[in-house]
Protein backbone atom coordinates (compact mmCIF):
# COMPACT_ATOMS: atom_id res chain seq x y z
CA UNK A 1 0.00 0.00 0.00
CA UNK A 2 1.37 3.41 -0.97
CA UNK A 3 2.19 5.74 1.93
CA UNK A 4 -0.36 8.42 2.70
CA UNK A 5 0.70 11.83 1.41
CA UNK A 6 0.60 14.45 4.17
CA UNK A 7 1.32 18.16 3.81
CA UNK A 8 1.99 20.27 6.90
CA UNK A 9 1.49 24.03 6.70
CA UNK A 10 3.99 25.87 8.89
CA UNK A 11 7.46 24.83 10.05
CA UNK A 12 7.24 26.31 13.51
CA UNK A 13 7.38 24.25 16.69
CA UNK A 14 4.09 22.43 16.04
CA UNK A 15 4.73 21.71 12.36
CA UNK A 16 8.24 20.42 13.01
CA UNK A 17 6.99 18.14 15.80
CA UNK A 18 4.22 16.77 13.60
CA UNK A 19 6.67 16.05 10.76
CA UNK A 20 9.12 14.45 13.19
CA UNK A 21 6.55 12.02 14.53
CA UNK A 22 5.16 11.07 11.13
CA UNK A 23 8.66 10.60 9.72
CA UNK A 24 9.23 7.86 12.28
CA UNK A 25 6.95 5.67 10.12
CA UNK A 26 7.87 6.65 6.56
CA UNK A 27 6.47 3.40 5.21
CA UNK A 28 3.00 4.74 6.03
CA UNK A 29 3.46 8.48 5.52
CA UNK A 30 5.09 10.62 2.87
CA UNK A 31 5.50 14.00 4.54
CA UNK A 32 5.89 17.45 2.99
CA UNK A 33 6.51 20.42 5.29
CA UNK A 34 6.18 23.94 3.87
CA UNK A 35 7.13 27.29 5.40
CA UNK A 36 6.52 30.73 3.89
CA UNK A 37 9.83 32.19 5.13
CA UNK A 38 13.42 31.10 4.68
CA UNK A 39 13.91 29.24 7.97
CA UNK A 40 12.20 26.83 10.32
CA UNK A 41 11.18 27.65 13.88
CA UNK A 42 8.45 30.25 13.45
CA UNK A 43 8.59 32.80 16.24
CA UNK A 44 11.51 31.04 17.90
CA UNK A 45 14.81 32.12 16.40
CA UNK A 46 18.14 33.63 17.40
CA UNK A 47 19.63 37.03 16.64
CA UNK A 48 23.42 37.30 16.29
CA UNK A 49 25.33 39.68 18.57
CA UNK A 50 28.83 41.06 18.66
CA UNK A 51 30.29 38.90 21.44
CA UNK A 52 33.23 41.26 21.96
CA UNK A 53 30.80 44.06 22.75
CA UNK A 54 27.94 42.30 24.50
CA UNK A 55 29.60 39.21 25.97
CA UNK A 56 27.34 36.80 24.09
CA UNK A 57 27.20 35.72 20.46
CA UNK A 58 23.40 35.47 20.22
CA UNK A 59 20.10 36.10 21.91
CA UNK A 60 16.91 34.10 21.49
CA UNK A 61 13.90 35.99 20.14
CA UNK A 62 10.38 34.78 20.82
CA UNK A 63 11.27 32.29 23.53
CA UNK A 64 14.19 32.21 25.90
CA UNK A 65 13.36 29.30 28.14
CA UNK A 66 10.56 27.35 29.73
CA UNK A 67 9.29 25.42 32.69
CA UNK A 68 11.09 22.27 33.77
CA UNK A 69 7.92 20.30 33.01
CA UNK A 70 8.36 20.68 29.23
CA UNK A 71 10.06 17.30 29.05
CA UNK A 72 9.35 16.70 25.37
CA UNK A 73 11.09 19.94 24.48
CA UNK A 74 14.20 18.92 26.39
CA UNK A 75 14.08 15.44 24.89
CA UNK A 76 14.07 16.93 21.39
CA UNK A 77 16.96 19.25 22.23
CA UNK A 78 18.93 16.25 23.45
CA UNK A 79 18.09 14.19 20.35
CA UNK A 80 19.53 16.94 18.18
CA UNK A 81 22.66 17.30 20.33
CA UNK A 82 21.78 20.46 22.29
CA UNK A 83 21.89 21.01 26.04
CA UNK A 84 19.56 23.08 28.20
CA UNK A 85 20.59 24.94 31.33
CA UNK A 86 18.53 24.89 34.56
CA UNK A 87 18.21 28.00 36.71
CA UNK A 88 16.06 29.10 39.65
CA UNK A 89 14.05 32.24 39.11
CA UNK A 90 14.44 35.37 41.19
CA UNK A 91 11.76 37.89 40.33
CA UNK A 92 11.42 41.59 41.08
CA UNK A 93 7.83 42.82 41.41
CA UNK A 94 7.30 46.58 41.48
CA UNK A 95 9.32 49.46 42.90
CA UNK A 96 9.55 51.39 46.18
CA UNK A 97 6.77 50.65 48.69
CA UNK A 98 5.08 48.46 46.05
CA UNK A 99 8.16 46.24 45.69
CA UNK A 100 8.11 42.57 46.60
CA UNK A 101 9.88 39.42 45.48
CA UNK A 102 9.71 35.66 45.79
CA UNK A 103 13.19 35.67 47.38
CA UNK A 104 12.65 37.58 50.65
CA UNK A 105 9.69 39.21 52.48
CA UNK A 106 9.07 42.94 52.14
CA UNK A 107 6.84 45.59 53.70
CA UNK A 108 4.21 44.88 51.05
CA UNK A 109 4.04 41.27 52.28
CA UNK A 110 3.62 42.54 55.82
CA UNK A 111 0.90 44.98 54.77
CA UNK A 112 -1.12 42.25 53.06
CA UNK A 113 -0.28 39.29 55.34
CA UNK A 114 -3.93 38.76 56.30
CA UNK A 115 -5.06 38.86 52.68
CA UNK A 116 -2.36 36.36 51.74
CA UNK A 117 -3.67 33.94 54.38
CA UNK A 118 -7.22 34.48 53.13
CA UNK A 119 -6.02 33.93 49.57
CA UNK A 120 -4.64 30.53 50.57
CA UNK A 121 -8.03 29.60 52.01
CA UNK A 122 -9.81 30.78 48.86
CA UNK A 123 -7.56 28.56 46.73
CA UNK A 124 -8.85 25.54 48.65
CA UNK A 125 -12.43 26.62 47.93
CA UNK A 126 -11.63 27.00 44.23
CA UNK A 127 -10.16 23.49 44.12
CA UNK A 128 -13.18 21.99 45.89
CA UNK A 129 -15.68 23.66 43.53
CA UNK A 130 -13.54 23.86 40.41
CA UNK A 131 -16.40 23.01 38.03
CA UNK A 132 -17.98 26.28 39.09
CA UNK A 133 -14.84 28.39 39.29
CA UNK A 134 -13.62 27.34 35.86
CA UNK A 135 -16.27 29.78 34.61
CA UNK A 136 -15.16 32.56 36.98
CA UNK A 137 -12.46 34.97 35.76
CA UNK A 138 -9.82 36.07 38.26
CA UNK A 139 -11.08 39.64 38.48
CA UNK A 140 -14.48 38.36 39.58
CA UNK A 141 -12.98 35.90 42.07
CA UNK A 142 -11.05 38.69 43.79
CA UNK A 143 -14.19 40.82 43.89
CA UNK A 144 -16.35 37.96 45.22
CA UNK A 145 -14.03 37.41 48.19
CA UNK A 146 -13.46 41.14 48.74
CA UNK A 147 -9.73 41.35 48.24
CA UNK A 148 -8.29 44.85 48.07
CA UNK A 149 -7.49 46.37 44.69
CA UNK A 150 -3.85 46.86 45.68
CA UNK A 151 -3.45 43.20 46.62
CA UNK A 152 -5.03 42.06 43.37
CA UNK A 153 -3.24 44.50 41.07
CA UNK A 154 0.21 44.45 42.67
CA UNK A 155 0.52 40.88 43.94
CA UNK A 156 -1.91 38.46 42.27
CA UNK A 157 -2.11 39.66 38.65
CA UNK A 158 1.68 39.97 38.17
CA UNK A 159 2.32 36.43 39.42
CA UNK A 160 0.06 35.05 36.68
CA UNK A 161 1.02 37.41 33.87
CA UNK A 162 4.67 36.54 34.38
CA UNK A 163 4.11 32.82 33.89
CA UNK A 164 1.26 32.85 31.37
CA UNK A 165 2.41 35.81 29.29
CA UNK A 166 -1.17 37.10 29.29
CA UNK A 167 -0.30 40.77 29.82
CA UNK A 168 -3.27 43.07 30.35
CA UNK A 169 -5.71 40.23 29.65
CA UNK A 170 -4.68 38.43 32.86
CA UNK A 171 -7.88 39.39 34.78
CA UNK A 172 -9.88 37.32 32.26
CA UNK A 173 -7.97 34.09 32.97
CA UNK A 174 -10.19 31.57 34.76
CA UNK A 175 -9.75 31.04 38.49
CA UNK A 176 -8.86 27.35 38.28
CA UNK A 177 -5.65 28.19 36.42
CA UNK A 178 -4.80 30.61 39.23
CA UNK A 179 -5.37 27.85 41.79
CA UNK A 180 -3.23 25.36 39.89
CA UNK A 181 -0.28 27.73 39.59
CA UNK A 182 -0.16 27.99 43.37
CA UNK A 183 -1.03 24.43 44.41
CA UNK A 184 -0.03 21.95 41.70
CA UNK A 185 3.23 20.10 42.51
CA UNK A 186 3.57 19.28 38.79
CA UNK A 187 3.24 22.60 37.00
CA UNK A 188 2.50 25.12 39.74
CA UNK A 189 5.06 27.88 39.31
CA UNK A 190 4.30 29.16 42.80
CA UNK A 191 3.79 25.78 44.45
CA UNK A 192 5.57 25.60 47.81
CA UNK A 193 5.32 22.28 49.64
CA UNK A 194 6.19 23.96 52.95
CA UNK A 195 2.98 26.04 52.92
CA UNK A 196 0.92 23.09 54.19
CA UNK A 197 3.42 22.43 57.00
CA UNK A 198 2.07 24.48 59.92
CA UNK A 199 5.43 24.33 61.71
CA UNK A 200 7.02 26.31 58.88
CA UNK A 201 4.65 29.22 59.37
CA UNK A 202 4.46 29.91 55.64
CA UNK A 203 0.70 30.12 55.25
CA UNK A 204 1.21 33.88 55.05
CA UNK A 205 3.79 33.61 52.27
CA UNK A 206 2.46 34.34 48.79
CA UNK A 207 5.44 32.94 46.89
CA UNK A 208 8.39 31.72 48.90
CA UNK A 209 10.00 29.44 46.36
CA UNK A 210 12.50 29.99 43.55
CA UNK A 211 10.75 28.35 40.58
CA UNK A 212 12.96 26.15 38.41
CA UNK A 213 13.32 27.21 34.78
CA UNK A 214 15.36 25.98 31.84
CA UNK A 215 17.27 28.28 29.47
CA UNK A 216 17.23 27.20 25.83
CA UNK A 217 20.22 26.95 23.46
CA UNK A 218 20.66 28.85 20.19
CA UNK A 219 17.26 28.27 18.60
CA UNK A 220 18.20 29.10 15.02
CA UNK A 221 20.96 26.50 15.12
CA UNK A 222 18.66 23.98 16.79
CA UNK A 223 15.88 24.33 14.20
CA UNK A 224 18.37 24.15 11.33
CA UNK A 225 19.82 20.94 12.79
CA UNK A 226 16.31 19.57 13.23
CA UNK A 227 15.42 20.48 9.63
CA UNK A 228 18.41 18.52 8.32
CA UNK A 229 17.44 15.58 10.53
CA UNK A 230 13.90 15.58 9.13
CA UNK A 231 15.20 15.65 5.56
CA UNK A 232 17.49 12.71 6.32
CA UNK A 233 14.35 10.80 7.36
CA UNK A 234 12.57 11.51 4.10
CA UNK A 235 10.60 14.67 4.94
CA UNK A 236 10.45 17.16 2.06
CA UNK A 237 11.05 20.55 3.71
CA UNK A 238 10.17 23.39 1.33
CA UNK A 239 11.06 26.86 2.60
CA UNK A 240 9.92 30.13 0.99
CA UNK A 241 6.78 28.28 -0.07
CA UNK A 242 3.34 29.54 0.82
CA UNK A 243 -0.10 28.02 0.68
CA UNK A 244 -2.28 30.25 -1.47
CA UNK A 245 -5.60 28.47 -0.99
CA UNK A 246 -7.34 25.17 -0.39
CA UNK A 247 -9.11 24.43 -3.67
CA UNK A 248 -10.90 21.21 -2.75
CA UNK A 249 -11.10 19.06 0.34
CA UNK A 250 -13.03 15.84 0.74
CA UNK A 251 -12.86 12.16 1.58
CA UNK A 252 -10.55 11.48 -1.35
CA UNK A 253 -8.01 14.08 -0.30
CA UNK A 254 -7.18 17.74 -0.64
CA UNK A 255 -6.18 19.89 -3.61
CA UNK A 256 -4.18 23.03 -2.82
CA UNK A 257 -2.48 25.93 -4.61
CA UNK A 258 1.13 26.67 -3.60
CA UNK A 259 3.43 29.52 -4.54
CA UNK A 260 7.22 29.51 -4.40
CA UNK A 261 8.92 32.76 -3.31
CA UNK A 262 12.47 33.72 -4.25
CA UNK A 263 13.31 34.91 -0.74
CA UNK A 264 11.66 36.06 2.48
CA UNK A 265 11.23 39.60 1.22
CA UNK A 266 9.57 38.49 -2.03
CA UNK A 267 6.11 39.91 -2.67
CA UNK A 268 4.91 36.41 -3.43
CA UNK A 269 4.06 36.85 -7.12
CA UNK A 270 5.74 33.62 -8.23
CA UNK A 271 4.03 30.99 -10.33
CA UNK A 272 1.30 28.98 -8.63
CA UNK A 273 1.23 25.20 -8.72
CA UNK A 274 -1.64 22.88 -7.86
CA UNK A 275 -0.81 19.80 -5.80
CA UNK A 276 -2.85 16.99 -4.27
CA UNK A 277 -2.42 15.26 -0.92
CA UNK A 278 -4.34 12.77 1.17
CA UNK A 279 -4.35 14.95 4.30
CA UNK A 280 -3.46 18.51 5.27
CA UNK A 281 -2.28 19.69 8.69
CA UNK A 282 -2.45 23.37 9.55
CA UNK A 283 0.30 24.23 12.05
CA UNK A 284 -0.19 27.97 11.78
CA UNK A 285 -2.18 30.67 13.49
CA UNK A 286 -5.93 30.30 13.69
CA UNK A 287 -6.90 33.29 11.56
CA UNK A 288 -4.40 32.23 8.89
CA UNK A 289 -5.87 28.73 8.79
CA UNK A 290 -9.40 30.13 8.51
CA UNK A 291 -8.40 32.44 5.65
CA UNK A 292 -6.60 29.71 3.72
CA UNK A 293 -9.44 27.23 4.11
CA UNK A 294 -11.88 29.79 2.76
CA UNK A 295 -15.08 28.16 1.53
CA UNK A 296 -13.64 24.72 2.28
CA UNK A 297 -13.89 25.36 6.03
CA UNK A 298 -16.73 23.66 7.89
CA UNK A 299 -19.04 25.72 10.09
CA UNK A 300 -17.29 24.33 13.15
CA UNK A 301 -13.87 25.32 11.83
CA UNK A 302 -15.09 28.82 10.99
CA UNK A 303 -16.57 29.17 14.46
CA UNK A 304 -13.53 27.94 16.40
CA UNK A 305 -10.85 29.57 14.28
CA UNK A 306 -12.75 32.85 14.23
CA UNK A 307 -12.67 33.08 18.01
CA UNK A 308 -8.93 33.72 18.18
CA UNK A 309 -8.10 37.28 19.26
CA UNK A 310 -4.69 38.91 18.96
CA UNK A 311 -2.62 41.66 20.49
CA UNK A 312 0.23 43.31 18.59
CA UNK A 313 3.43 44.18 20.41
CA UNK A 314 6.02 46.81 19.54
CA UNK A 315 9.56 46.00 20.63
CA UNK A 316 12.55 48.26 21.29
CA UNK A 317 16.03 46.88 21.89
CA UNK A 318 18.71 48.94 23.64
CA UNK A 319 20.91 48.97 26.73
CA UNK A 320 19.51 51.71 28.95
CA UNK A 321 20.56 50.78 32.49
CA UNK A 322 19.30 54.14 33.76
CA UNK A 323 15.74 53.11 32.89
CA UNK A 324 16.05 49.91 34.89
CA UNK A 325 17.48 51.69 37.92
CA UNK A 326 14.69 54.26 37.81
CA UNK A 327 11.78 51.87 37.38
CA UNK A 328 12.78 48.58 39.04
CA UNK A 329 14.42 47.12 42.11
CA UNK A 330 17.56 45.42 40.88
CA UNK A 331 19.22 44.39 44.15
CA UNK A 332 18.50 43.75 47.82
CA UNK A 333 16.51 46.64 49.31
CA UNK A 334 17.24 46.81 53.02
CA UNK A 335 14.65 49.54 53.52
CA UNK A 336 11.84 47.35 52.17
CA UNK A 337 12.99 43.99 53.59
CA UNK A 338 11.19 42.57 56.64
CA UNK A 339 12.59 39.65 58.64
CA UNK A 340 9.65 38.73 60.86
CA UNK A 341 6.30 38.96 59.08
CA UNK A 342 3.60 37.90 61.56
CA UNK A 343 6.30 36.69 63.97
CA UNK A 344 7.75 34.23 61.45
CA UNK A 345 11.54 33.86 61.40
CA UNK A 346 12.58 34.84 57.89
CA UNK A 347 16.28 35.30 58.63
CA UNK A 348 17.26 32.55 56.18
CA UNK A 349 15.29 34.21 53.37
CA UNK A 350 16.77 37.59 54.26
CA UNK A 351 20.25 36.10 54.04
CA UNK A 352 19.39 34.70 50.62
CA UNK A 353 17.90 38.04 49.65
CA UNK A 354 21.19 39.84 50.19
CA UNK A 355 22.37 37.99 47.09
CA UNK A 356 19.26 39.10 45.19
CA UNK A 357 19.86 39.16 41.44
CA UNK A 358 16.50 39.27 39.62
CA UNK A 359 16.03 37.52 36.31
CA UNK A 360 12.51 38.76 35.55
CA UNK A 361 10.79 42.03 36.32
CA UNK A 362 7.11 42.95 36.34
CA UNK A 363 5.06 45.78 37.75
CA UNK A 364 1.71 47.55 37.37
CA UNK A 365 1.69 51.24 36.48
CA UNK A 366 0.90 53.49 39.42
CA UNK A 367 -1.38 55.61 37.22
CA UNK A 368 -3.22 52.54 35.86
CA UNK A 369 -2.58 49.65 38.22
CA UNK A 370 -4.61 47.26 36.07
CA UNK A 371 -2.00 47.66 33.28
CA UNK A 372 1.22 45.67 33.50
CA UNK A 373 4.76 46.18 32.32
CA UNK A 374 6.69 42.92 32.06
CA UNK A 375 10.40 42.71 31.42
CA UNK A 376 12.26 39.47 30.91
CA UNK A 377 15.82 38.56 29.93
CA UNK A 378 16.55 37.45 26.40
CA UNK A 379 20.28 36.85 26.52
CA UNK A 380 20.96 33.25 27.61
CA UNK A 381 23.11 34.54 30.45
CA UNK A 382 21.58 32.90 33.48
CA UNK A 383 23.69 29.78 33.19
CA UNK A 384 25.68 30.23 30.00
CA UNK A 385 27.24 33.56 30.98
CA UNK A 386 27.04 33.72 34.77
CA UNK A 387 30.09 35.94 34.99
CA UNK A 388 28.39 38.67 32.96
CA UNK A 389 26.19 41.47 34.26
CA UNK A 390 24.41 41.92 30.93
CA UNK A 391 20.66 41.57 30.84
CA UNK A 392 18.19 41.68 28.01
CA UNK A 393 14.64 42.65 28.82
CA UNK A 394 11.29 42.57 27.08
CA UNK A 395 7.72 43.89 27.43
CA UNK A 396 7.08 47.40 28.56
CA UNK A 397 4.87 50.34 27.73
CA UNK A 398 7.08 53.29 28.62
CA UNK A 399 9.16 55.04 25.93
CA UNK A 400 12.83 55.15 26.82
CA UNK A 401 15.32 57.97 26.72
CA UNK A 402 18.42 57.54 24.63
CA UNK A 403 21.05 57.46 27.38
CA UNK A 404 22.86 54.41 26.10
CA UNK A 405 26.56 53.89 26.34
CA UNK A 406 28.55 50.81 25.26
CA UNK A 407 29.02 49.90 28.93
CA UNK A 408 25.32 49.81 29.77
CA UNK A 409 23.60 46.41 29.88
CA UNK A 410 21.62 45.35 26.83
CA UNK A 411 17.92 46.05 27.44
CA UNK A 412 14.89 45.15 25.39
CA UNK A 413 11.62 46.89 26.16
CA UNK A 414 8.44 45.45 24.74
CA UNK A 415 5.66 48.00 24.29
CA UNK A 416 2.31 46.41 25.08
CA UNK A 417 -0.24 49.23 24.95
CA UNK A 418 -3.10 47.55 23.15
CA UNK A 419 -6.32 46.83 25.05
CA UNK A 420 -7.36 43.33 25.96
CA UNK A 421 -7.83 40.92 23.05
CA UNK A 422 -7.08 43.63 20.49
CA UNK A 423 -7.28 42.40 16.93
CA UNK A 424 -4.25 42.97 14.76
CA UNK A 425 -6.35 44.71 12.10
CA UNK A 426 -7.77 47.30 14.43
CA UNK A 427 -4.46 47.81 16.16
CA UNK A 428 -2.64 48.55 12.93
CA UNK A 429 -4.98 51.47 12.30
CA UNK A 430 -3.68 53.19 15.42
CA UNK A 431 -0.44 55.15 15.64
CA UNK A 432 1.79 52.14 16.16
CA UNK A 433 4.14 50.63 13.61
CA UNK A 434 3.74 46.95 12.82
CA UNK A 435 7.51 46.65 12.50
CA UNK A 436 10.26 47.35 14.99
CA UNK A 437 13.99 47.66 14.72
CA UNK A 438 16.61 45.84 16.73
CA UNK A 439 20.26 46.79 16.96
CA UNK A 440 22.48 43.77 16.41
CA UNK A 441 26.22 43.91 16.02
CA UNK A 442 26.10 47.53 14.92
CA UNK A 443 23.40 47.06 12.28
CA UNK A 444 19.63 47.33 12.28
CA UNK A 445 17.45 44.38 11.40
CA UNK A 446 13.70 44.75 10.87
CA UNK A 447 11.56 42.23 12.67
CA UNK A 448 7.86 41.52 12.68
CA UNK A 449 6.63 41.54 16.29
CA UNK A 450 4.94 38.33 17.45
CA UNK A 451 1.18 38.32 17.86
CA UNK A 452 1.08 35.75 20.62
CA UNK A 453 2.68 35.76 24.03
CA UNK A 454 6.35 34.92 23.76
CA UNK A 455 6.43 31.27 24.70
CA UNK A 456 7.45 27.99 23.15
CA UNK A 457 5.87 28.47 19.77
CA UNK A 458 3.12 30.57 18.35
CA UNK A 459 0.63 28.12 16.95
CA UNK A 460 -2.94 28.52 18.13
CA UNK A 461 -4.71 25.67 16.38
CA UNK A 462 -4.19 22.75 14.06
CA UNK A 463 -6.64 21.20 11.61
CA UNK A 464 -6.61 17.76 10.07
CA UNK A 465 -9.91 17.16 8.29
CA UNK A 466 -11.59 18.05 11.59
CA UNK A 467 -10.67 20.46 14.34
CA UNK A 468 -8.08 19.05 16.70
CA UNK A 469 -6.55 20.72 19.71
CA UNK A 470 -3.16 22.26 20.27
CA UNK A 471 -1.89 24.52 22.99
CA UNK A 472 0.28 27.23 21.46
CA UNK A 473 2.80 26.62 24.24
CA UNK A 474 3.25 23.12 22.90
CA UNK A 475 5.67 22.04 20.22
CA UNK A 476 3.39 19.23 19.13
CA UNK A 477 -0.12 17.97 18.73
CA UNK A 478 -2.35 14.94 18.81
CA UNK A 479 -3.58 14.07 15.35
CA UNK A 480 -7.10 12.77 14.84
CA UNK A 481 -8.04 9.30 13.66
CA UNK A 482 -7.64 10.16 9.96
CA UNK A 483 -3.90 9.59 10.34
CA UNK A 484 -4.30 7.06 13.13
CA UNK A 485 -1.21 8.25 14.98
CA UNK A 486 -1.27 8.98 18.69
CA UNK A 487 0.76 11.09 21.09
CA UNK A 488 2.70 13.27 18.69
CA UNK A 489 5.68 14.35 20.78
CA UNK A 490 5.77 17.99 21.69
CA UNK A 491 6.86 20.44 24.30
CA UNK A 492 5.05 20.84 27.53
CA UNK A 493 2.46 18.09 27.13
Image (tube, rainbow, N blue to C red):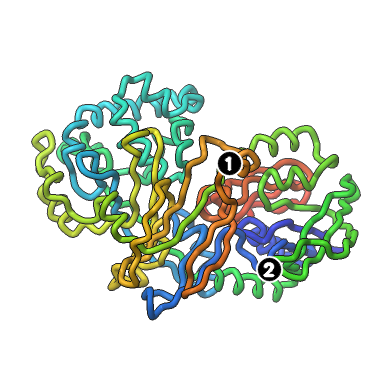
Residue 449 pos. (x, y %): 56, 54
> Quadrant of residue 108 in the image?
top left
Camera-side mark, 2 or 1: 1
User: x%, y% of residue 298?
Assistant: 80, 36
Apparent side of residue 5 relative to residue 361 in the rendered image (left or right):
right
Of residues 327 and 218, the one nearer the viewer is 327
Residue to which mark 2 is pinned: 38
Quadrant in which the N terminus appears: bottom right
Numbered label attached to residue 430 = 1
Location of residue 37 in the rendering, given as x and y in whole percent from the top left corner = 69, 64
Instruction: Report the front residue among 272 and 318.
Output: 318
Specify whether residue 1 is in view.
Answer: no
| Mark 1, secondary structure of its residue | loop
Residue drawn where x is 67% and y is 61% of the image: 11
Q: How crowded is mark 2: few (under 14 residues within 10 Å), some or many (20 or more)?
A: some
Q: Residues within 10 Å of mark 1 (few under 14, many from 20)?
A: few
Going from N to C along the chain, the mark reached first, 2 or 1, is 2
Q: Which dot marks residue 304?
A: none
Residue drawn at (71%, 53%) of the image = 485
> Residue 264's quadrant in the figure?
bottom right
Q: Relative to residue 4, is residue 110 depicted above or below?
A: above
The answer for how far apart the CA atoms under marks 2 and 1 are is: 30 Å
Amino acid sequence: MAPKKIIIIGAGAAGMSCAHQLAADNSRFSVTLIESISRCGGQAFSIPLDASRHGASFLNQGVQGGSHIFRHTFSMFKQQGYDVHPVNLQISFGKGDKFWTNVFPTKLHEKHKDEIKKFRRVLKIVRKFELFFVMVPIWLLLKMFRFSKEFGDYMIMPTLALFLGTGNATPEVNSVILERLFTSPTYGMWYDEEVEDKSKGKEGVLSGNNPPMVVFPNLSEFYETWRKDLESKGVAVRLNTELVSVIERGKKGVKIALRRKNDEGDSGEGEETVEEYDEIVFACQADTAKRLLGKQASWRERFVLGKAKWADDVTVTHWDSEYMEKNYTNRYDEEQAVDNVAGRDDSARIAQGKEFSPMYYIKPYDQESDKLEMISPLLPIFSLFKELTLRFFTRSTVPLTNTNSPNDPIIRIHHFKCPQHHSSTKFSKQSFSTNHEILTSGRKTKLIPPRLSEKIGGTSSVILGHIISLSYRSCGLSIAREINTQNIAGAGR
